[in-house]
Structure formats: structure tokens, C-alpha cells
Image (cartoon, grey):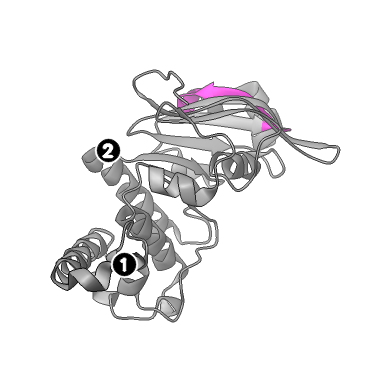
């Protein structure tokens, strides 16, 4: 179903509500994520951030409200269907296939892989050519995320930070237009945290990929983001430029403990 969006808005939620029994986790939340921007969602634990991300990415169905992606009402769509539209999700704890190599993990993320088709063996030459193109693309992405030297290593041997880069590589292989990320720099040292966020900024600026992330390490993340939403008790309590949001009295009181 078509749903009009502003031209520069790739994702919008309209009055989204999600409850668990008597607990209202997300309460009438409306946000806009603009194309080729890095939008940050902050808030204390239990504020509804991850629940909102789960609703947007199809892991939860909202009790009310709508989710609009690229002008299409995708409310309640399952994750795999959203993935094929170009909306991908990463998690706080990366989930690669540990016994497969780094390269194999990236190749598995490709959409429309010829191996998924029963008719592929009947078109062997075309299939082989597509396989070669996918491998070439995967190597290019691994160079981009600085994992090329580990292409033949089992993914389970990567460090925590490298696994986060592998997660990003897999979403790039899928052709994602919008990437939802839950704490992409959690648990990594400050140097690697800056590396990850600089890489995200590069993808945003050079490839036009949009990022909507949750992050608690504001001292680092605020240096890179374009726009911020703050939540508390299931509601959006502030939004705007990073410097505006962190100085908002409601945010200081509920999130920063000021």
C-alpha cells in the first residue's frame, strides 16, 4: 500500500505502540529517518529503544501505528521480507556462522543467489558466472571493511570488533539501503569504536546508505551522528541535533542522570 513520505525520508513510524501484558514498551512513537544520514536513538535501559527497533525490523508486530519504508506500508511484515526490500538489522551480539569462513559468511548474505534456484543446474554457465561475480563483490566488501586478510579464517575466530565489521559486510552484500544497528560499538575498545563509526560515515557519504542506530557510548557516537531521538518510558522525549538533545533538561534528567 503506498504511503506518502517526504522525499528525503526513507523510514517513518506513525504512532507505533507495543505492549507486553500490562507493560507499555513503546507508546505512540513517531519518528523519521532521513536518507543517507546517521540517526541515533538514545535512552536509559527499559526506555523502549530495542522494542521499537524490533517493531521496525519485523521481529514484533505493533499493537497500533504504522511503519513506512520507502513509501510502502510494511507494518507487521516479517524480517525476511523486509530484508529483500533493503531493510537489514544487526544485533548487539553478532551472530555469524562460526565454522564458516569470513568469505562464506559474506556470500551467504547475497540476495537471489543462484544456488537457491532448482533450475540453476540447468544453466550451469550462467550460474558459474554469477558465482564468480558474487565472490568478486564479497572480496571488494571485505577490503572495504578491512577484513580481507582474514577472508579464509573461520568467523568464530574473529574478535568482537571484527565480528561487528563482518555483520556490516554481510548487510552490504545484501544490498541494504537502511541498516538498523543495536549498539554497534558496544564492548569494543575506543580506537576500534572510532574506526567502526568512521566506516559507517564513509558508507553514508560515499554509498548513500542510511543508518539508524542505538548506542549508549554517547561520548564517542555523538561525534558522528546527524540527528538524535531520545526515548524514556516508551515515548520520544526529545529530538534534534546532537548538541540540542544532550542539553535538553528532559534528557539530562531521564538518561544522563544530571
Q: Residue 87, how many percent across, how many down?
A: 43, 44
**Residue found 23% across the figure and 58% down from its top:** 144
In terms of secondary structure, where does tag 1 sit? helix
Q: Is residue 59 visible?
A: yes
Task: Determine crowd level at label 2: few under 14, some 14-19, many 20+ residues with C-alpha closer than 10 A.
Answer: some
Above or below, comparing residue 36 to residue 32 in the picture: below
Above or below, comparing residue 6 to residue 222 in the picture: above
Depth check, front residue: 237 or 176: 176
Q: Is residue 5 left or right of residue 140?
A: right
Residue 258 figure quarter: top right
Q: Is residue 102 left or right of residue 212?
A: left
Residue at the disc numbered 1:
107
Highlighted magenta segment, given as a residue range: 232-244
Check residue 134 in the rendering and tell me which mark sits there, or answer none: none
- Mark 1 or mark 2, which is nearer to you? 1
**Residue found 74% across the figure and 33% down from its top:** 233
Q: Residue 98, how many percent across, how many down?
A: 46, 77
Q: Residue 66, how many percent across, how many down?
A: 58, 27
Residue at the disc numbered 2:
208
Depth check, front residue: 165 or 19: 19
Task: Check residue 212 for magenta coloring.
Answer: no
Above or below, comparing residue 11 to residue 114 in the picture: above
Depth check, front residue: 254 or 74: 74
Q: Is residue 86 visible?
A: no
Instruction: Kindly give the residue lying farthest to the right in the view shown.
Output: 22
Task: Check residue 243 for magenta coloring.
Answer: yes
Depth check, front residue: 146 or 19: 19
Q: Is residue 60 left or right of residue 176?
A: right
Q: Residue 48, how many percent across, how many down?
A: 67, 39
Q: Earlier in the sequence, mark 1 or mark 2?
A: 1
Q: Is residue 225 left or right of residue 110?
A: right
CA–CA distance in space, label 1 to label 2: 22 Å
Amino acid at each position: 500500500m503506498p504511503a506518502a513520505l517526504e522525499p528525503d525520508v526513507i523510514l517513518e513510524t506513525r504512532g507505533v505502540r507495543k505492549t507486553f501484558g500490562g507493560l507499555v514498551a513503546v507508546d505512540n512513537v513517531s519518528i523519521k529517518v532521513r536518507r543517507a544520514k546517521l540517526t541515533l536513538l538514545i535512552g536509559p535501559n527499559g526506555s523502549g529503544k530495542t522494542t521499537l527497533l524490533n517493531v521496525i525490523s519485523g521481529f514484533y508486530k505493533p499493537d497500533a501505528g504504522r511503519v513506512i519504508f520507502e513509501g510502502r506500508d510494511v507494518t507487521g511484515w516479517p524480517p525476511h521480507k523486509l530484508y529483500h526490500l533493503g531493510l537489514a538489522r544487526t544485533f548487539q551480539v553478532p551472530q555469524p556462522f562460526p565454522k564458516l569462513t569470513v568469505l562464506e559468511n559474506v556470500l551467504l548474505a547475497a540476495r537471489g543467489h543462484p544456488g537457491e534456484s532448482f533450475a540453476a543446474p540447468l544453466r550451469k554457465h550462467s550460474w558459474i558466472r554469477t558465482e564468480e561475480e558474487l565472490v568478486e563483490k564479497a572480496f571488494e566488501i571485505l577490503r572495504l571493511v578491512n577484513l580481507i586478510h582474514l577472508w579464509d579464517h573461520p568467523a568464530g575466530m574473529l574478535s568482537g570488533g571484527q565480528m561487528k565489521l563482518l555483520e556490516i559486510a554481510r548487510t552490504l552484500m545484501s544490498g541494504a539501503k537502511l541498516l538498523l544497528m543495536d549498539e554497534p560499538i558496544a564492548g569494543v575498545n575506543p580506537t576500534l569504536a572510532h574506526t567502526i563509526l568512521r566506516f559507517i560515515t564513509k558508507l553514508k557519504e560515499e554509498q548513500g546508505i542510511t543508518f539508524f542506530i542505538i548506542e549508549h557510548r554517547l561520548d564517542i557516537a555523538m561525534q558522528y551522528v546527524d540527528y538524535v531521538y531520545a526515548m524514556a518510558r516508551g515515548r520520544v522525549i526529545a529530538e534534534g541535533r546532537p548538541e540540542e538533545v544532550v542539553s535538553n533538561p528532559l534528557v539530562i534528567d531521564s538518561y544522563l542522570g544530571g
